[in-house]
Amino acid sequence: MSESPTTNCSAFDGGRLIAAGPLKEVALAVKAALDAGAAGPVLTFDDADGAVIDLDLRGSDAEIVARLGASADEAPPRGRGRPKLGVVAREVTLLPRHWDWLAAQPGGASVALRRLVEQARRSDGGATEANQAKAAAFRFLSATAGNLPGFEEALRALFAGDRVNFAERASRWPPDVRDYAMRIAFGPRKAMS
């Protein structure tokens, strides 16, 4: 498991949200729900990307928490870079003329690449983040809502970026599923002026 014990996630028992928050807290809530006879399926989702998180719920609460803490500590050793700043070296393949241009930039190649990436992020108008949000919502919906009425029409609205149409198509779904999908796909509801 690559998730950190502080990863924000949400767990569902069928169409009902049973817990949301840091992974350790949600894992314990899922175990309690299963022990209490949850109807299921009980699924836990990473709030950032909508992926299902597989939880190892064997043993006591302390063992579960310890296992979750251990998985974060088992990160591979870091290579070059500045790990305290979150900088990790990765490979970039460029043509010799690109390397020449980068080397001639003030601050060198790393500074120039960071500047170019930030400039591109600002100029895409949030399209990258919107696409990532749609993909996260799609992963969640594929696991929870595939058999719900209006699923395909809701997906069309999701990928069209049509919040109102999505909400209309999902109106007959369990409220927790609909609300969670809306939040990860479109962000928190903003007040209408």
Image (cartoon, grey):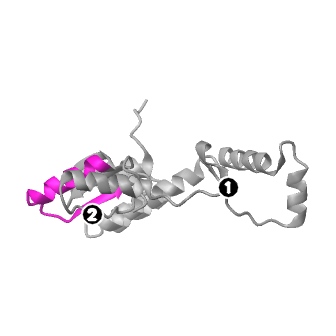
Within-10-Å neighbours for mark 2: few <14, some 14–19, many 20+ = few
Residue at left offset 67%, top offset 55%:
80
CA–CA distance between discs 1 and 2? 33 Å
Q: Residue furthest left?
A: 36
Quarter of the image for the N terminus: give it: bottom left
Residue at left offset 39%, top offset 64%:
139
Residue 75: image x %, image y %?
48, 58
Work out whether residue 181 or residue 107 is closer to the camera in this orientation and state it. 107
Of the numbered discs 1 and 2, the one sitting upstream in the chain is: 2
Residue 104: image x %, image y %?
91, 49
Mark 2 residue type: Asp
Marking on residue 7? none
Residue 171: image x %, image y %?
27, 53
Within-10-Å neighbours for mark 1: few <14, some 14–19, many 20+ = few
Indicate yes or no whether the magenta region holds residue 159.
no
Q: Mark 1 — residue?
A: 80
Badge 1 marks a residue whose secondary structure is loop
Q: Quadrant of residue 68?
A: bottom left
Work out whether residue 174 or residue 17 is closer to the camera in this orientation and state it. 17
Q: Between label 1 and label 2, give the one nearer the viewer.
A: 1
Give the magenta part as a residue range: 24-46
| 103 lies left or right of 50 | right
Indicate yes or no whether the magenta region holds residue 28.
yes
Residue at left offset 83%, top offset 43%:
107
Mark 1 residue type: Arg
Q: Report whether residue 172 is seen.
A: no
Badge 2 marks a residue whose secondary structure is loop
Q: Mark 2 — residue?
A: 56
